[in-house]
Image (cartoon, rainbow, N blue to C red):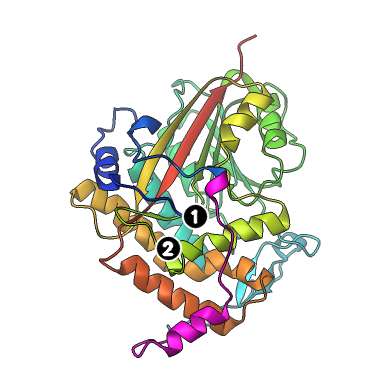
């Protein structure tokens, strides 16, 4: 998840707990149930504090310490497709010297992705999708499959469907359901699947990886069968806090500025949520019957409701498992030193786990149908 300048929220706990209390067979609450108003694109603040600020903070903090960080190395170069590059000790997908995806692809990052998948599964009320899919769907495409965990679960749930997961990095497991296969592919290029051949296209957290969302969704539209669905899941660009607004000099408030600034620098926005890019791109691509749900995703140990607390704890674990993996690429692009990154992450972990913060972000799911005629 990325983050930006947050907006104050007054009733996040009630909304978040309402999400967790939704029965598995029920729909996720509408956007109207979300607390206050979601931050607009004009509210996004990309004024990031310099890296030296966090070193000064640590020097003024008597009990500060640097977390031990294990040595990570690049993967073995077995073929050109596995030609990763290393930034601040983490491996990233590499293609012609320029990473197309901002997140690392090493073992620690993969563990974080799997934890995040479970948090999303809980957030949706133990569902893998919200689009109204027919039981007899035949072909499904998961774009940006990552570790492949969503595709694996979906293939298990729909054993009669052929499921294909694509990604730029070959990090998926080999022990998979018989109706699933993984392919190395770049979704920002022209898709090679036959027109009118796919029943359902799923995307999740492509934020910061796509320069032209309309072009992406047009490729999905072309390949979908008439009546087929595209479903897109993307987060808001920032943490918010239930109750008092976050201090703009706090690590939580500064978190997303890495991504907003980095997205601007590389031409791949992180403000997909704030700019309503999912719906706009689907409309431009020709989809109809577009629906969306905005869900509050709590982070931490603060919710009182047990189901909501479980969501919040897994979401917290996602960030605590690999916060460096989230920010390292853009911190490097902003010329931060390793020490500056570590001092910032020290403060971030503390704030996220602090009982004085009741952090959450927003998760929007949008789906649309290709017309029958």
- Give left or right: position of 265 versus 227: right
Q: Whole-percent x and y of residue 76?
A: 67, 72
Question: Foreground: 102 or 179?
Answer: 102
Outermost residue to the right: 96
Q: Main secondary structure of the magenta part?
A: loop
User: Of marks 2 and 1, which one's residue comes earlier in the chain?
Assistant: 1
Residue position for label 1 = 1
Q: Quadrant of residue 220?
A: top right
> Which residue is at 55% across, 84% downward?
339
- The magenta span reads 42-66
Residue 30 appears in the figure: no
Residue 225 found in image quarter = top right
Q: Which mark is residue 189?
A: none
In this figure, which residue is indicated by the disc labeled 2? 319
Q: Element under label 2?
A: helix
Q: Classify mark 2: residues with Cα within 10 Å, few (<14), some (14-19) or many (20+).
A: many
Q: Position of residue 12 (x, y in %)?
A: 30, 46
Whether residue 51 is in magenta: the answer is yes
Give whichever of 121, 218 is nearer the camera. 218
Q: CA distance from mark 2 to mark 1?
A: 9 Å
Marks 1 and 2: in contact by CB < 8 Å? yes
Q: From what the image shows, is residue 130 above or below residue 311?
A: above
Whether residue 130 is visible, yes or no, is: yes
In the rendered image of this protein, does residue 95 appear above or below residue 55? above
Is 345 in front, or is 233? Answer: 345
**Is 199 situated left or right of 313 in this image?**
right
How packed mark 1 is, by other alpha carbons closer than 10 Å (few <14, some 14-19, many 20 or more), is many
Name the residue located 47 percent from the left edge and 35 percent from the top edge. 365
Up the image or down, 127 lies above or below 58; here it is above
From the viewer's side, name the closer residue of 99 and 286.
286
Residue 267 in percent (x, y) is at 72, 52
Q: Write the residue at 30% across / 58% down.
A: 358
């Amino acid at each position: 998840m990325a983050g930006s300048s947050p907006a104050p929220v007054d009733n996040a706990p009630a909304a978040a707990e309402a999400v967790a209390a939704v029965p598995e067979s029920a729909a996720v609450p509408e956007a109207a149930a979300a607390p206050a108003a979601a931050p607009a694109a004009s509210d996004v603040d990309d004024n990031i504090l310099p890296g030296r600020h966090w070193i000064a903070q640590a020097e003024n903090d008597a009990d500060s310490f640097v977390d031990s960080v294990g040595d990570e190395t690049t993967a073995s170069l077995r073929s050109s497709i596995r030609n990763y590059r290393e930034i601040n000790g983490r491996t990233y997908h590499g293609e012609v010297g320029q990473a197309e995806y901002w997140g690392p692809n090493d073992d620690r990052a993969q563990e974080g992705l799997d934890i995040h998948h479970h948090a999303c599964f809980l957030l949706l009320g133990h569902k893998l999708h919200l689009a109204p899919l027919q039981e007899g769907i035949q072909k499904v495409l998961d774009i940006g499959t990552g570790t492949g965990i969503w595709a694996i679960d979906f293939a298990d749930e729909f054993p009669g469907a052929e499921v294909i997961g694509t990604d730029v990095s070959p990090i998926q497991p080999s022990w998979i359901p018989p109706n699933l296969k993984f392919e190395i592919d770049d979704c920002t290029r022209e898709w090679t699947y036959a027109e009118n051949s796919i029943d359902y296209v799923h995307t999740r957290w492509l934020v910061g990886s796509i320069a032209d969302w309309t072009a992406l969704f047009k490729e999905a539209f072309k390949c979908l069968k008439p009546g087929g669905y595209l479903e897109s899941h993307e987060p808001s660009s920032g943490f918010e806090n239930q109750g008092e607004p976050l201090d703009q000099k706090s690590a939580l408030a500064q978190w997303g500025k890495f991504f907003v600034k980095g997205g601007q620098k590389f031409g791949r926005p992180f403000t997909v949520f704030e700019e309503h890019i999912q719906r706009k791109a689907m409309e431009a691509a020709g989809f109809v019957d577009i629906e969306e749900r905005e869900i509050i995703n709590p982070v931490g140990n603060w919710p009182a409701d047990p189901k909501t607390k479980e969501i919040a704890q897994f979401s917290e674990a996602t960030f605590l498992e690999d916060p460096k993996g989230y920010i390292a690429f853009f911190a490097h692009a902003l010329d931060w030193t390793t020490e500056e990154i570590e001092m910032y992450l020290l403060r971030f972990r503390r704030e996220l786990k602090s009982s004085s913060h009741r952090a959450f972000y927003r998760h929007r799911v949008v789906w649309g149908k290709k017309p029958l005629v």
